[in-house]
Image: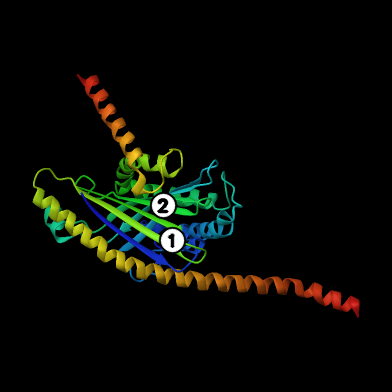
Amino acid sequence: MKVFSNSETFNYSWEEVSTANWRKYCPWNDKSTHVVAVDTLSRHVDPKTGILRTERLITCQQNAPELLKKLLGGKEETQVLETSYVDPAHKTVTMVSANLTYSNLINVEETVIYKPLNEHQTQFSQEAKITALCGGWQRIKNSIEDTLVKRFRENAIKGKEGFEAVLEMSRRVFAEEREREKMMMIMAQAPNIRLIHAQAA
Amino acid sequence: MSQSLAKQCNEVKERYDTCFLKWYSEKYLRGAANADSNECSALFKEYSACLHGALKDRGIDKLLEDAREDNKENDATFMGRKKCKRGYSHSQPCLLTFQTHRIITRIWIGTGRR
């Protein structure tokens, strides 16, 4: 088994990060283009703890590492099941992802945690455990695991850049929406104000 | 928003995602959410029904069953039903009990077959 771990700081509040996380793989993110589809499979709130549990199916179109392609013939699409837990009381988002494709050969389990550092900053920590399952042949196992660790490292850099872009856009869109709502409120109140003025006059 | 795996579900998925995001940021994070149902439930039902066939056709439903089974330990940990420390770096006590449980199950299945 090989382990890849990484941690980053985002200069956005936990609320902003946890919201933008739902659209991490949208067109605003031009770095993570290997993710071609994201589908929500199930979602519910635990009445006791208030924890929101979500299952998403992530479809990637990324060429499998050369070595795997040679061994397996290389599938175009690969799927990952992501189970996430949002705990609003402890302000934590935990996401556990496991590969569905090639799961009889390789086990990849990634855990991502988003926690607030303070009111304006959020820490992202990621750990991936990669285990090649094919029997015997330690050298082959090692090189499969190393290849995947390398892939994780490459994707981690792109992932941060892409998510930064999504966070920036989200903040802008939310600000615009708030502005529009404020305008609507003023517009809605305008007749009343005019009425009060007329009565006063 | 991102695309759906099944093209025919894109439209309802988009409507559901938009509804969810609004609910999440305006209600859920502000502690004003209802656990049983919300304004997006009907849309989610429609979206799930659309997706169901696509998952079956691609044989993903079977893979999902296995993956869900493997994820049960994480569910217990992160849904707060288990008294062990949160986070993967402190999960040792949980991991131990899980493995013990697995070994016992295996022995039990083994003796049953004999």
Element assignment for label 2: strand
Q: Position of residue B99 (x, y in %)?
A: 29, 35
Judging from the image, mark 1 belongs to the subunit labelled A
Q: Which residue is mark 2?
A: A94
Q: Is residue A59 placed above or below B82 in the rendered structure?
A: below
**Which residue is more in the foreground, A154 or B43?**
A154
Circle nearer the viewer, 2 or 1: 2
Specify the quadrant of the image occupied by residue A24: bottom left
**Which residue is more in the foreground, A132 or A81?**
A132
Q: Is residue A33 visible?
A: no
**Whole-Å distance between the Cαs marked 2 and 1?**
11 Å
Q: Position of residue A179 (x, y in %)?
A: 61, 74
Q: Is residue A118 visible?
A: yes
Image quarter where the C terminus of chain B lies is top left
Q: Is residue A184 placed above or below A37 in the rendered structure?
A: below
For residue A95, side relative to residue A135 (left or right):
right
Is the residue at mark 2 from the same chain as the one at mark 1? yes
The residue positioned 88% from the left and 78% from the top of the image is: A198
Q: Farthest residue to the bottom: give it.
A: A201
**Crowd band around label 2 with a 10 angstrom C-alpha radius: few (<14), some (14–19), many (20+):** many
Q: How is the image coloured?
A: rainbow
Q: Which residue is mark 1?
A: A21
Judging from the image, mark 2 belongs to the subunit labelled A
Q: Position of residue A96 (x, y in %)?
A: 36, 50
Specify the quadrant of the image occupied by residue B83: top left
**Mark earlier in primary sequence (2, 1):** 1
Residue type (three-letter) at the residue carrying disc 2: Thr
**Which residue is more in the foreground, A8 or A34?**
A8
| For the residues bearing labels 2 and 1, Cβ distance under 8 angstroms | no
Q: Position of residue A181 (x, y in %)?
A: 64, 70
**Which residue is more in the foreground, B53 or B108?**
B108
Residue type (three-letter) at the residue carrying disc 1: Asn
